[in-house]
Amino acid sequence: MLSSMSLELQRQHEHMLPYEMLTHLKSLYASQAQTMEYEILRDLFKCELHDGSKVSEHVLNMIGLIERLASIGTVIPTNVSTNQILQSLPSSFENFIVNFNMNNTKVGLPELRNKLKTYESSTAKVKSVLMVSSSAKSSKWKNKPQ
């Protein structure tokens, strides 16, 4: 254990038993972990997808924050992580969220990302068709004599 420490830490711990070393190291670094946990949770709770932004990048960012929390010992259950991601989405994803909850869907975070990405691409196609259709109608009416 000593070989992986800096020289100063080795000097401080050279006469301690392994359990004593662990206890001392935890006391040294516990406040840093608590601060890091606070900052990551703050970033996670502030995550919000804005209309026009890509859902895939947004969800990847949130998954990264959730994994960083797990790496410091704060494990968030999958259902809570899923709900946090769904709550960060704009109203344009309301149909997806209602459908997801009504079907009582249980998926991992990568699969949730894929489903959201698919939904986003399908709604983008519908929006573009609607825009073309509405612009075509308006040009017909403008050219019609009165």
Image: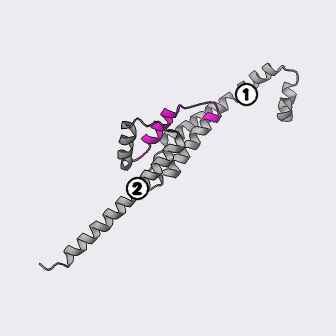
Cα separation between marks 2 and 1? 51 Å
Q: Nearer the viewer, mark 2 or mark 1?
A: 2
Q: Which residues are magenta?
A: 70-89
Q: Main secondary structure of the magenta part?
A: helix
Element carrying mark 1: helix
Q: Is residue 54 left or right of residue 91?
A: right
What residue does disc 2 label?
A: 122
67 or 113, nearer to the observer: 113
Point out residue 62 in the picture as x, y percentages from the top left corner: 53, 43
Point out residue 44 in the picture as x, y percentages from the top left corner: 52, 40
What residue does disc 1 label?
A: 28
| Relative height, residue 19 to residue 57 (above, below) | above
Q: Looking at numbered disc 2 in the image, what kind of residue is underneath it? A: Ser
Q: Earlier in the sequence, mark 2 or mark 1?
A: 1
Looking at the rendering, in which quadrant would you find the C terminus?
Answer: bottom left
The residue drawn where x is 88% and y is 21% is: 15
The residue drawn where x is 47% and y is 36% is: 106
Which labelled disc corresponds to residue 70?
none
Indicate yes or no whether the magenta region holds residue 39: no
| Relative height, residue 95 to residue 80 (above, below) | below
The residue drawn where x is 44% and y is 41% is: 86
Q: Is residue 72 left or right of residue 18?
A: left
Q: Is residue 139 left or right of residue 90?
A: left
